Amino acid sequence: MIARVRALLLPLALASVGGVSATAAQEDVGAGSGQPLNAALAACDRVRFRVALDVGHTVEQPGALSARGMPEFVFNLLLAERIERALRAAGFDRTRLLVTDGAAKPSLFMRVSHATDIEADLFLSIHHDAVPQPLKETWEYEGRQLEYSDRFRGHSIFVSYDHAQARASLAFARLLGLAMKARGLAYTPHYTEPFMGPRRRQLVDAEAGVYRFDALVVLRRTRMPAVLLEGGMIVHREEELALAAPERQELVSAAVVEAVERYCATEASELSALRRARPAARTRPVVRLPAILGSGIPVLPGRD
Ligand SMILES: [Zn+2]
């Protein structure tokens, strides 16, 4: 299944002409996000800490369409898989990918309940961005009339203030934003503009690029701190190519790992208190692969 999805993005990855160099960025790891990684990180119990990586959208409702006609869901899945591998390589063995299927609204509540069932300590939803319809233009790509917008590029990070653990959500969002920034990745500032209409958001951390989005189901109904990352602008014709390339996905994955390490370390004492207060999960949840991508095999055993 993974090979099939990766093959979908391969032509775009090969066409990639730019993006940020992973090598150059690695030299800056830690810069701009406070003190360097140090002994304080030992406070994090990586073996126990569980990140739920939510793959935004479903095969049936795949989200935005990229400038070259690739569904957002494909970008989301490939980036989330790469983040999962990076987290596991860093010792966060309990990391779980949440892949849901079906219609959009029920799938949102499924994501929330899965994250609860697997007792996640942190919920990170992975998406890729587009712009409102009036900002789009049309072009022809490989014989198809498609929509694009080259006006805005960059990632963005969202949290809900309508959440019992809004402070912790914001803390992780800030760590993630700073880790992205330290790797030369700039966030898009356009969400504050009036032309965004109902999608206009308040920028609550201008240094780290964190916006407030109170109403989003996965950000307000989750029981654990929750953050949504729009990895970049897939309707932007240049940025789309960079986002399809493994180099960019690795850069973002490294930023997520650094942010999770720092968050886990700083929140460690609070987390262990929360764990003690939390009742055990009742069921072993299973998330099925979307049928179009695989053979319907369950991919997410609940706990290990
Ligand atoms: Zn999305």
Image (spheres, rainbow, N blue to C red):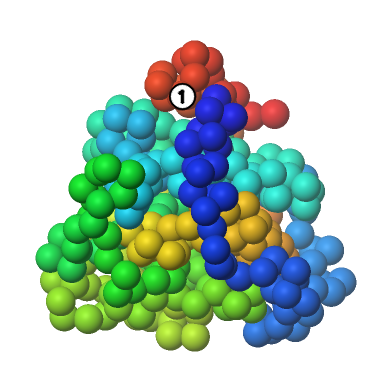
Residue 259: tell me if it is visible. Answer: no
Residue 51 location, x and y as percent? 60, 48
Dividing the picture into quadrants, the one containing residue 157 is: bottom left
Please, is residue 178 above or below residue 113 in the view? below
Q: Residue furthest front?
A: 143
The quadrant of the rendering that contains the C terminus is top right
| Left or right: residue 197 compared with residue 265 | left
- Residue type, mark 1 in image: Leu
Mark 1 lies within 8 Å of ligand 1 (Cβ measured): no
- Find disc 1 in the rendering and name its residue: 293
Q: Position of residue 41 (x, y in %)?
A: 79, 67
Secondary-structure class at tag 1: loop
Name the residue: 43% across, 65% down.
Answer: 238
Residue 275, placed above or below residue 208: above
Locate the N terminus and report the quarter of the image it occupies: top right
Rendering coords of residue 27 (x, y %):
77, 77
Q: Is residue 239 left or right of residue 13?
A: left
The relative height of residue 247 versus residue 14 in the rendered view (above or below) is below
Most foreground residue, 3 or 13: 13
Seen from the viewer's position, the closer of residues 47 and 165 is: 47
Can residue 46 be seen in the rendering of this structure?
yes
Residue at 25% of width from left, 43% of height from top?
144
Q: Is residue 21 above or below residue 87?
A: below
Number of labels in the image equals: 1
- Which residue occupies 46% across, 24% down? 293
Residue 95 lies, in percent from the top left, at 64, 42
Question: Camera-side residue: 38 or 25?
Answer: 25
Image-quadrant location for residue 164: bottom left
Q: Residues within 10 Å of mark 1 (few under 14, many from 20)?
A: few
Measuring 36% from the left and 64% from the top, which residue is drawn there? Answer: 236
Which residue is most to the right? 39
